[in-house]
Amino acid sequence: MNIQKIRSMLHTLLAFCLILGFAAQVSAQRLDRVYARFANPQFDQETRGYTLDVELRSDQENQFLFGMNVRFFYDATKLEFQSFDDFHPGYGTLGASPSARKGTPTSGLQLFDFSAEASFVNSAIQLQDESTPMKLQNTHWKKAFRLNFRIPESVDDHRPFCPSVLWDLKATPGAGSFLAGSDGLVVTLLDRDPASRQVSAPTLVKSEPFNWAYGAVEAMPYGNPKDDNCTPLSQLVSSSNTVIADEKGYALFQNQPNPFAQGTRIEFVLPDAMEAHLVFYDVTGKLLKVLEGDYAKGLNAVNLDRQEWMGQSNVILYQLKTTDHTSGMRKMTLVNQ
């Protein structure tokens, strides 16, 4: 399948945008701005399932989600799409069950600087029970639903797992999708004006990709993969709550959510009850903070609010230290609202 064929299929699938009531010609200056991201990766070792939450927030208060044209790309060598689930109450898939389409082996390289092919999903969700609309917040993210993937057997479990997943949306708000003639990701709000005949209102959408960054110029490839939110598959907590640690009984997990604006959570495993330190550095290696505490055997967690010592750093490195153990570094990313 070449790029022209992908374009053709995406044009056909634009009907979803019309179903959601999107008005493409509305002036961007008059639209409410909505942000979309992927967050909270989870892995089930037994099924090799990998999930990402779809989260939204709005610049304005008292906005309620009506629907989404859900279109995203991902690295097909690392993920196999399965389904949507775990919807906010009152929402569900619009039309047929979502499915993935795979491009040529060079499509990912041409568009996104992947090492091989890219796949994309085009579907829609919509409010189905108007008694339970999802209220968007301007201070924190709200989960709309979840994406379910499977990790192929060909993926090396002994290396950090950093899959790229990105919304079909250019970096400039209002610029549309990566492929000409398409609006890409679309979010509509519930029109609560009693004088209006419309059930939905369009928005200006800005997206945050997952393990991928936009390039400086809007030209192919539009950006490149980043190892911002990686997870070693051999050191995760499975759905059966079995903690997998190293041979000494230690594990340090990726902070969640990541990236974060206001707060995040760091989990770690200790072989026995003991004193432990979480140590934080900037990208130059300068020590920023040491959090000390006495912790229990097994899984522990520290909730970390954004604090003054974090400064204006976009990236902070952290590690776990005890009297007989020093973990490898993990990286957390801060974003400004």
Image (spheres, grey):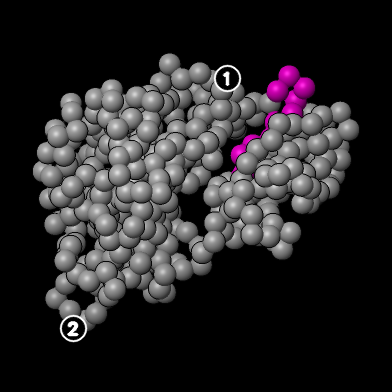
Quick one: label 1, few (<14), some, or many (20+) residues within 10 Å? few
**Which secondary structure, mark 2?**
loop
Residue 107 sits above or below residue 24 on the image:
above
Residue 83 visible (yes or no): no
- Cα gap from disc 1 to disc 2, whole angstroms: 59 Å
Q: Residue at x 18, y 83 (%)?
A: 195
Side of 284 where 326 appears, left or right: right
Seen in the picture, residue 199 relative to 266 is either above or below; the reply is below
Would residue 247 be counted in the magenta stretch?
yes
Residue 328 shows in this picture: yes
Q: Position of residue 156 (x, y in %)?
A: 50, 18
Horizontal side of 274 relative to 154 (left or right) equals right
Q: Which residues are magenta?
A: 246-255
Coordinates of residue 55 in the picture (x, y in percent): 42, 53
Circle 2 sits on which residue? 195
Q: Secondary structure at mark 1?
A: loop
Residue extending farthest bottom: 195
Residue 103 within the segment the image draws in magenta: no
The foreground one among 69 and 24 is: 24
The quarter holding residue 187 reads bottom left
Residue 60 appears left or right of 260: left
How would you rate the neighbour count of disc 2 (Cα within 10 Å): few for under 14, some for 14-19, many for 20 or more? few
Residue highlighted by disc 1: 158
Q: Residue at x 43, y 16 (%)?
A: 154
Amino acid carrying label 1: it is His
Task: Please identify the residue farthest to the right as the structure is shown.
Answer: 323
